[in-house]
Image: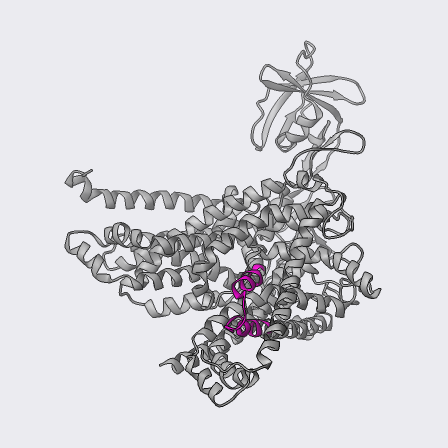
Amino acid sequence: MAIVIDKSQRWRVVAAHVFMIGLCALVIFPLLIVVAISLRPGNFATGSLIPETISLEHWRFALGIPTPGPDGQMITPDLPVLRWLWNSVKVATASATVALFLSTTAAYAFARMRFVGKKSALLGLTLMQMFPTILALIAIHAIFSRIGHAFPLLGIDSHWALVLAYSGGIALHVWTIKGFYETIPVEIEEAAIVDGATPWQAFWRVLLPMSLPILVVVFLLAFIGAIIEYPQASVLLRTQPNLTLAVGSKQFLYAQKYLWGDFAAAAILSGLPISAVFILAQRWMISGLTSGANKG
Amino acid sequence: MRMPKVLQRFLHPVLMILVGLAGLLVVTQVYATGESLLAGIMLVTLACFLWIYTSSKTYAYRYLFPGIGAALIFVVFPMLYTIRIGFSNYSSKNLLNFQRSTQYLLEETYRGEGATYTSELHADGRRWRLRLEDAESGKVFVSEPITLGPEKPITIKAEPLGIPLMGDEMPMKDLIEQQAFLKGITVKMPDGNQVRMTGLREFAPSKQQYTRNPDGSLTNHQDGSLLRPNMKTGFYETPSGDPVDPGFQVDIGWKHYFSIFTDAAIREPFLQIFVWTVTFAFLSVLFTVSLGMVLAVLLNWEALRFRSVYRLMLFLPYAIPGFISILVFKGLFNANFGEINLILHGLFGLKPSWFSDPFLAKTMILIVNTWLGFPYMMVVCMGLIKAIPPDLYEASAVAGAGPLTNFFKITLPLVIRPLTPLLISSFAFNFNNFVLINLLTGGRPDILNTSLPAGTTDLLATYTYRIAFEDSGQQFGLAAAISAVIFLMVAVISIIQIRATNITQDDRR
């Protein structure tokens, strides 16, 4: 831009830097203080940002390593953080796989085929997305407790129930994948069909391998979405060993049992990998962001 | 690998018939457990499946079926079912359906007349024998050997003790684990009495309390009274009209829907919460978009150095999982131990009670939500500002316009239109921002003098959640009715959003 630089420009630049640095400090402060808190001894300790005495008790708690109590007996931490993390990863992997299977096939039909009701189905997918599932929590709870009467494996407090409940939320993924398919020239598949491939083979052997990048992105999106999902998990999971991280973390900060330091360690332990995956994936997600998603 | 032609031709139909038969078998089994609604849905799904994967006309639907099916069953159906539950009295008091509730009562027992026995389980090889000792006379009886297994009713015989039992007694811990199985045992004593487990170490004569009459009423054998099911209240009632637990689900019509608008005890907190929900959603959008827009403009300003460093740092709140950052703030804002109050106390001598004062709690929620939400707006605005042709700014520079004029005359008017649908969707999102409120304040501090728990910081969504899952009454029916009303509100917002989106798309053409 060829804008004439006047004298006030310098002051404005300085002011902008001050503003930016101040804001960055506000953003970074909670993150740094959590690191400090996780290293302070005790759950009610106060002190400066750089702790004077470093204690690893909270990290031992978060990692589930037994610590000697005041009477010399070994105490095992009573909140199974690693188990919750493992549950989250399990549920997220399963539901991301399911989401990928359901949305790639549906998107193929939407992008490449003609059929009755295509327009209304696409509109329906958009509308569905506008109604948050939290409004249907009561029904979801009732449905899965009913399913549980017939199939105990899929009832309340089962991870499979959660995977099933998440499997319906594919609207956004279908749109994302459909958009990507439409950038691939249809002639490539037509050539495969001319060579004798069935439409399924054209999809499975030709289109899908070419769509690998978007499949990775959708998988990561669905994975992160399942990891951070809280409302449905809080209704469907009941017993402590079965909780996912998003539901279990709440138990650190009850008024009666305030485990601030332990929570800080657990938050870093679990938040760091999730955030890292998110930042890796966000490059491709920016385009998806503008199509109406929001932070959950 | 190539299959023989015959196999290739018949594989598909044979497979479909097998799937159909297996599916029907499962459906009948589900129907047998009394879940007729579930069985019905499964039957419809199965029929659709068979039709779509056998007819050649439905080829495209073969690709759609799994995805659309999952969306219909697990997203659309629960929403419709929510509205349906709003018409019923489903709650912790009326949890079971009529069949199950009747079944429950028919399984009730009471202690009849006759001797009481102290019981012990002794090992006999891999099986177990019950040793029953008459508490009064000291006579000892022993049952035939039993194999422990899943819960099911069995009847066994007991004889007077011949040779003393040699096997070890079952320890208390295992006994508690086997309780469900043991409760299903009926022991026939030599004197003809039947005894059942009445305590962990006690067997006593127990009799079925109720039997069912042909007209649907239940006779109570203990006092001879008659229970009749009341299909309006959802309870079996004694002749004097007292309800007997457990109740069952019945339809109560529009009662819940009416009470939201007519019952003062529900209407007043509902209105107050509605006002706060709208205020919260509006202010959240306003704050996040204002901050995000300012940052986007600054980050697009080429005179500013280190822009990529700033952008990375400012993006961080978006990357951290929401449930973690919200809980971090819950700790930081803690009135006594939280770091924020420590700093405020050190600087100004203040110690605001963020969680017990309604106004401060609302302020805190808005601060946290702005922290969480501005990066999204920043990223979105940056993209939109990048799309503005730079020659507009060049022209305005030639005309001698300052940065403020640039912003209000060029940037804002060009950005606001494509931004509007996103602002509405952000409003809709915050309107139902359940996770933030539930994890940060849980809706508290509570409004005083309400019949149902309602908080000053509750959103409509968290309010229904509390009625359904946190308050001891578990009033699913009422909560579902409120959810259905929120559905309507969200529908209105969605219509506005679709309109706004269409307008922007028309602009682009």
Quadrant of the image occupied by residue B345 = bottom right
Residue B14, horizontal then vertical, whole percent: 25, 43
Residue B246, horizontal then vertical, whole percent: 66, 50
Residue at (56, 31) in percent of width and height: B150
Residue A93 is left or right of residue B322, and the answer is left
Residue B94 is left or right of residue B394, and the answer is right
Tell me if residue B429 comes above or below residue A10 in the rendering.
above
| Quadrant where the image shows the C terminus of chain B | bottom left
Q: How many marks?
A: 0
Residue at (66, 13) in percent of width and height: B167
Decide whether residue B306 is among the magenta residues: yes
The residue segment tinted magenta is B291-316
Residue at (28, 55) in percent of width and height: A207
Tell me if residue A49 comes above or below residue B232 in the rendering.
above
Q: Residue furthest bottom?
A: B399
Question: Magenta residues: mostly which secondary structure?
Answer: helix
* Camera sees residue B319: yes
Quadrant of the image occupied by residue B290 = bottom right
Q: Residue furthest front?
A: A7
Residue B460 is left or right of residue B360, and the answer is left
